[in-house]
Amino acid sequence: MSTFQAPKGTYDLIPPDSATYLAVRDAIAAPLRTSGYGYIETPGFEDVNLFARGVGESTDIVTKEMYTLTTKGGSELALRPEGTASVLRAALEANLHKAGNLPVKLWYSGSYYRYERPQKGRYRHFSQVGAEAIGTEDPALDAELIILADQAYRSLGLARFRILLNSLGDKECRPVYREALQAFLRDLDLDEETRRRIEINPLRVLDDKRAEVQKQLTGAPLLRDFLCDACKAYHEEVRELLTEAGVVYEDDEKLVRGLDYYTRTTFEFVHDGLGSQSAVGGGGRYDGLSEMIGGPALPSVGWALGVDRTVLALEAEGIGLDVPAPTSVYAVPLGEEARRVLFGLVTELRKAGVATDFAFGGRGLKGAMKSANRSGARYTVVAGERDLAEGGVQLKDMESGEQEAVALGDLVAVVQARLA
Ligand code: ATP
Ligand code: MG
C-alpha cells in the first residue's frame, strides 16, 4: 500500500484478470477487422464544444458527467465521454469522406471518462470498443453493425443478452412527434428540471429511470405511430435483414438512448445478469451529427460496447475465457555460467515465437521452480554446470513431471515441436 489509491470510481486492470479485458477487446474488434473497418485512434481530450454540440446540450453526459479543464493556454477541453463525436471530427478533419469511398468504416478502442456516481458497472473511467460507418444511408449498414456486435458477443460465449431495437424517425417525422409528446408531457406532474427537459429534449423524458415518472408515461404518444413512410420502410428493412441473418431482437418503442444525435435506427444491447447497469452497449444512426459539428450532411451509423460491463456479463454467466498462459517455457539457471547460457537461449526461444520467461535475481532452485510453477509454463529448462559440461540442458514437462536432457543446439526445435 502506498500513500495513494486509484481515484474514486476507477480501478486498475491487473494480471491475471487484465488478460480477460484484452481478450474481450480483441473479441469485439475481431468481426469489425474482417468487415472492412479500419482502426482509428483519437486524443483522449477534445474541445469541450465538440461534445456540447455533438453529444447534445441537454444530455446528462454534457450537463453532469463531463470532466472539463482549462489549459494553461486558455483552451477549454473535456476528457472524452464517448467516441462518436471525436471519430467523426477526425474523419472530417482528414477528409476521409472525400476520398470517394463511402461509407468510411472505422473502429476504435479506448478509455472514456464520465463523472458519475460510481457503482458496480458504472465507473468514472471505463473502456469501450466502438465502430462507426460514416457517409451512407443504407439499412444494410445498420443491420451489418448490429450483426457484428451480436457476433462479437456470441464469440465470447454470451447467451443472456438481448437486443432492443427502435426507430427514432428523421427530421421530417420526428418534429411532429416531438410536439405531440411535449403536449402530453406538459400536462404531467413533473419536477422543474424535467419540465425544462420537455422543452429542450422531450424524448429524453421517456428515458427517465424513476418509477413515479414512468407511471405517468403510460399512454404517452409512441413514435412508432408517427413515423413517415420513408422511415417506416427503412426500419422494416433493417428488421428483415436482421431476421434473415438469424439475429434475434425485441422491438422497444420506448428506447430513446441518451444522446441527442440519434435518428432512425437505435438499439441497445442489454444483459440480464447485470442488475440496474444492464446496458452493455448501444448505438444507432446519427444522420444529423456531422452538420451539428459544422460538417457536410453525412448520414452515419455506429455503436459502442462497454468492455467493463461485458466482462461483468461474462462473470454473471460464469464464462471463463480460454486465455493462453502468458509463458510456455521458464528457464532456471543454476550458477553464473548457466545464467549466461540460458539467458541467451531465452532470447533465441523468444525470437522463435515461444513465450519464454527467466528466473531473474539469482534465486536458488527451489524458489525458481516455484516461480516456474506460478508462471503457468508448460516446460522448464534447467541447467547447471554439469549439464553445460555435457553440452545440454534439462527440459522438464511440468504436466507429466518427466525430464530429459536436450542438446543446447536442439532446444529451440525440440520445444517448438513439443508445443505444436
Ligand atoms: P447508461 O444508461 O447505463 O448510463 P449510457 O447510455 O450512458 O449507459 P452509452 O453512452 O451508450 O451508455 O455507452 C455505451 C456503453 O458504454 C454502455 O452500454 C456501457 O456498457 C458503457 N458505459 C457507459 N457509461 C459507463 C460507465 N460510467 N461505466 C462503465 N461503462 C459505461
Ligand atoms: Mg450514462
Image (cartoon, helix red, strand yellow):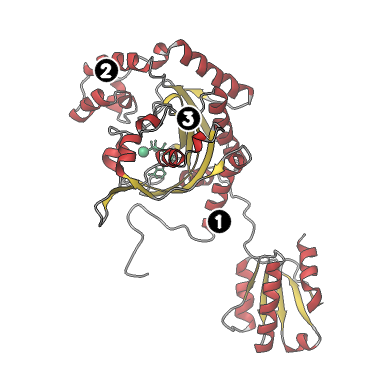
> In the current view of this chain or complex, which residue is farthest to the left?
192
Q: Nearer the viewer, residue 204 or 370?
A: 204
Direction from residue 260 to residue 266 in the image, left or right: right
Q: Position of residue 362 (x, y in %)?
A: 59, 84
In the picture, measured across the screen, residue 87 lies left or right of residue 48, that is right
What crowding class fits label 2: few (fewer than 14 Cα within 10 Å), some (14-19), or many (20 or more)?
many
User: Residue 182, labelled with which disc?
Assistant: 2
Label 2 C-beta lies within 8 Å of the nearest ligand 1 atom:
no
Question: Looking at the image, is 293 positioned above or below residue 379?
Answer: above
- Which residue is at 60% across, 36% downward? 151
The C terminus, quarter of image: bottom right
Q: Which mark, residue 300? A: 3
Left-right relation of 198 to 325: left
Residue type at numbered disc 3: Ser
Residue 11 percent coordinates (x, y): 40, 56
Q: Earlier in the sequence, mark 1 or mark 2?
A: 1
- The location of residue 159, given as percent across then percent down, is 57, 36
Q: Hey, which quadrant is residue 198 in on the image? A: top left
On the question of residue 416 being in view, the answer is: yes
Three-letter amino acid code at disc 2? Gln
